[in-house]
């Protein structure tokens, strides 16, 4: 199509903007796929999906529909941008989400049409960890009434894979040791029933503990109590937990793969994880001399959450990876149903919906999981008490991955936690991103700035002068902040005049160790490039060498 024909086609297919249709110029994809929240592509996709689905057309002028075209694709294609957006928009349904490319034959302009499916039942689509919607011509964080309407949508009959009966299975397919352990855990959970439990036959106990249905063996019973050879009853699902030990270079050193009964296997996997002591190398009394690298509750909660929330229909393993460098990583297949971890921490409320409700109920009765909504929050608080980094959740690749770090990454961050106990858990999670050098959203930056907890320019933030003073970190603050630009410019100019000339290597040796510690090596090199360019533009120094091997001399 030529440009005129394409304009007519777009006008006929997408005649006006509405909650289901948006036109945007977005000529430079480098800054607009994930940019300022409420203004970028992922925010518009969230807003459109959270209504009835629809279309986002980019490369055309807002209001007029004049074709401007996409000028800078920033290595994006209609195929790979779909994967990028799916990673940035939790709960977006991948089925039906695609990008259509339209080109003009006469003016070589490109327009992309994002075809966006409606949100799944009871799952608002997020961008920047928030659900969005369109109100008239504005994009806003989803209003509470709209969010509640989505969360309370009827979804018909909810299929629960874990509640299905295994017709050919009998009590003989369950492990006696696992049943004995289940009885003890049940009595610990419900001590007022302990004497009564001892009188129950196995069949009665299994019914009472919600593992069987009227004596019939469920998939939950096989997962939690089944003998290893009984795994075939849940085919094609897989009941496997894999522990892998890796060295600091990520090379595999040891592994174990266990099948059902998960009630016993989970404890065996827990025992595989090395119980190393972590020593704080400090001279004051802020920290204990020695502490376990990982809190036992955190490990057990993470393993049991993987079992409870695994999407068994995807036929995969539950993985526990231990790295000798002080990291534990747990992963299970399936989406994270609450949408984002910040909401779980902020609301501190039990989930209303589970992927495997029958399994979760049984695990609660057997003292394996906490369904009152505080399990994940307790994991975060245990890390906080140790001054360790917060658990790190990742929802990419159709699985949920959580990483637990068993050491201090940034002593400044640890001091902040130790000396400002009034920080909320949500604020600590924001500061945690600072110490890990992770990207902060605009709202997180605003919150931390308003509380005077951070300084610096995006993305190079560091603890503020006020915090540094309160925690005795004045020197570290100065190292992060660095000096004024004029200081560096004067230093280079003075050295050039003193020595007659300087090579790039000379300038690097002069400046590198004086630049802010918050910069990585690449950012420091860029900073030096900018300083040299400014002196050159101002006519204060001249390159008497070559472009490849510059030699700078004074111009005065």
Image: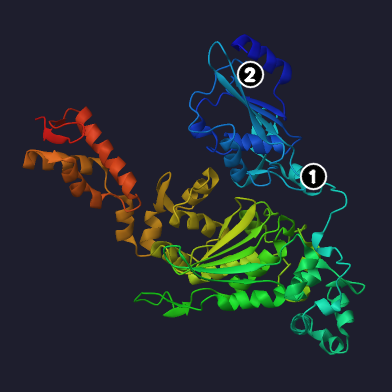
The N terminus - image quarter? top right
Quick one: 328 or 152, which is closer to the camera?
Answer: 328
The local secondary structure at tag 2 comes to loop
Quick one: 205 or 292, which is closer to the camera?
Answer: 205
> Which residue is drawn at the image coordinates 56% and 37% (left, top)?
80
Alpha carbons under labels 1 and 2: distance apart: 30 Å
Quick one: 407 or 142, which is closer to the camera?
Answer: 407
Tell me: 347 left or right of 201: left
Residue 542 coordinates in the image, percent (x, y): 15, 30
The local secondary structure at tag 1 comes to helix
Give the label on residue 93, or none: none
The C terminus - image quarter? top left
210 shown above or below 496: below
> Which residue is drawn at the image coordinates 32% and 50% (left, top)?
481
Reading the image, the residue beneath label 1 is: 149
Do tag 1 and tag 2 residues touch (Cβ < 8 Å)? no
Tell me: 438 left or right of 220: left
137 shown above or below 242: above
Reading the image, the residue beneath label 2 is: 63
Residue 61 coordinates in the image, percent (x, y): 59, 19
> Which of pointers 1 and 2 lies earlier in the amino acid sequence?
2
Tell me: 55 left or right of 328: right
Tell me: 201 left or right of 370: right
* Residue 266 visible in the snapshot: yes
């Amino acid at each position: 199509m030529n440009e005129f024909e394409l304009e007519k086609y777009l006008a006929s297919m997408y005649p006006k903007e509405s909650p289901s249709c948006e036109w945007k110029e977005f000529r430079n994809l480098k800054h607009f796929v994930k940019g300022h929240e409420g203004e970028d592509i992922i925010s518009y996709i969230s807003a459109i999906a959270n209504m009835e689905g629809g279309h986002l057309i980019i490369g055309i002028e807002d209001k007029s529909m004049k074709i401007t075209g996409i000028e800078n694709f920033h290595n994006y294609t209609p195929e790979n941008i779909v994967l990028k957006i799916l990673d940035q928009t939790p709960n977006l349904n991948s089925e039906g989400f695609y990008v259509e490319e339209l080109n003009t034959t006469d003016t070589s302009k490109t327009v992309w049409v994002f075809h966006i499916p409606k949100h799944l039942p009871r799952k608002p689509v997020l961008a920047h960890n928030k659900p969005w919607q369109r109100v008239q011509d504005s994009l806003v964080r989803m209003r509470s009434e709209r969010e509640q309407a989505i969360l309370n949508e009827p979804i018909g009959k909810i299929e629960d894979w874990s509640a299905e009966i295994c017709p050919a299975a009998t009590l003989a397919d369950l492990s006696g040791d696992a049943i004995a352990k289940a009885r003890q855990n049940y009595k610990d959970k419900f001590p007022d029933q302990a004497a009564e439990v001892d009188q129950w036959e196995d069949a009665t106990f299994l019914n009472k503990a919600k593992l069987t249905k009227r004596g019939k063996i469920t998939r939950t019973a096989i997962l939690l109590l089944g003998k290893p050879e009984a795994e075939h009853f849940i085919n094609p699902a897989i009941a496997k937990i894999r522990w892998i030990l890796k060295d600091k270079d990520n090379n595999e050193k040891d592994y174990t793969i266990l099948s059902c009964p998960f009630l016993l296997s989970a404890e065996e996997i827990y025992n595989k994880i090395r119980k190393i002591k972590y020593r704080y190398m400090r001279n004051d009394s802020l920290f204990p001399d020695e502490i376990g690298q990982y809190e036992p509750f955190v490990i057990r909660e993470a393993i049991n959450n993987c079992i409870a929330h695994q999407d068994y229909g995807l036929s995969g393993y539950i993985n526990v990876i231990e790295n000798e460098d002080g990291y534990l990583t747990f992963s299970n297949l399936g989406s994270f149903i609450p949408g984002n971890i910040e909401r779980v921490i902020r609301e501190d409320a039990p989930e209303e919906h589970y992927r495997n409700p029958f399994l979760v109920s049984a695990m609660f009765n057997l003292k394996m999981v906490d369904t009152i909504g505080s399990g994940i929050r307790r994991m975060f608080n245990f890390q906080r008490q140790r001054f360790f980094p917060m658990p790190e959740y990742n929802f990419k690749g159709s699985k949920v991955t959580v990483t637990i770090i068993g050491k201090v990454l940034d002593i400044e961050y640890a001091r902040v936690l130790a000396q400002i106990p009034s920080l909320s858990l949500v604020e600590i999670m924001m500061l945690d991103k600072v110490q890990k050098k992770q990207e902060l959203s605009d709202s997180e930056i605003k919150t931390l700035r308003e509380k005077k907890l951070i300084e610096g320019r995006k993305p190079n933030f560091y603890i503020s002068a006020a915090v540094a003073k309160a925690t005795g970190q004045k020197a570290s603050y100065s190292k992060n902040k660095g000096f004024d630009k004029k200081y560096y410019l004067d230093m280079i100019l003075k050295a050039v005049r003193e020595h007659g000339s300087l090579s790039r290597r000379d300038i690097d040796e002069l400046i590198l160790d004086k630049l802010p510690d918050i910069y990585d090596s690449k950012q420091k090199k860029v900073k030096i490039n900018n300083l040299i360019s400014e002196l050159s533009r101002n006519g204060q120094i001249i390159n008497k060498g070559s472009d490849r091997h510059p030699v700078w001399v004074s111009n005065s």
